[in-house]
Amino acid sequence: MDTALAPEAITNEVRMKRRVLGVLILASTAVFAARTVGAGQAEDVAAIRDVESRQAEAWNRHDAKAYAALFTEDGDVVNPARASSCRSCGGRPASG
């Protein structure tokens, strides 16, 4: 009994191995990318929570300078209760 594979069978086997390898590479790349994005997102969330905490602390201390220091010079504060009646809620130059 001849156990040699026909050339078509070898070609199909090679194609299948290439497909499996391609799928494994794509899957591992997706997992790596998800972990990288997740780590960066966690750092962003932690930074935002820190600003929120410092903002609340400054507000509760009635410390306007500490509260204002959390904003950039071109930052805007929009009061949601008045946003519909406010055409331009832009800030003004910071005072020293």
Image (cartoon, rainbow, N blue to C red):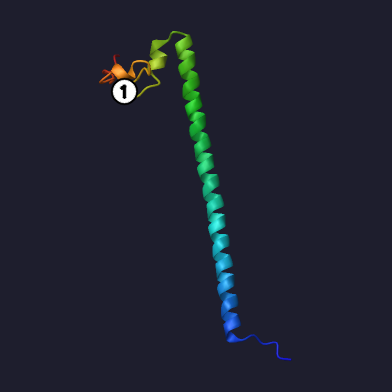
Q: Residue 14: give x, y in percent of width and height.
A: 57, 76
Crowding around mark 1 (Cα neighbors within 10 Å: few <14, some 14 to 19, many 20+) is few
On the rendered image, what quadrant is the N terminus found in?
bottom right
Image vertical order of residue 28 relative to residue 7, above or below: above
Q: Which residue is mark 1?
A: 73
Rendered image quadrant of residue 13: bottom right
Q: Residue at x 25, y 20 (%)?
A: 87
Q: Position of residue 8 (x, y in %)?
A: 57, 83
Residue ID at (70%, 91%): 2
Number of residue marks: 1
Residue at 59% of width from left, 71% of height from top?
A: 17
> Horizontal placement of 42 versus 81: left or right?
right
Q: Amino acid at mark 1?
A: Glu
Residue that protrudes farthest toward the right in the picture: 1
The C terminus: image quadrant: top left
Residue 43 at x, y percent in the picture: 51, 35
Query: Looking at the image, which residue sits at the far top?
Result: 62
41 left or right of 93 in image = right
| Residue 3 located left or right of residue 77 | right
Q: Nearer the viewer, residue 70 or 24?
A: 24
Asked where in the image residue 72 lies, by quadrant, the reply is top left
Label 1 secondary element: loop
| Residue 18 point in image, percent of width and height | 55, 70
The residue positioned farthest toward the bottom in the image shown: 1
Residue name at image x 57 percent, y 56 percent? 28
Task: Tell me: residue 65, above or below residue 31.
Answer: above
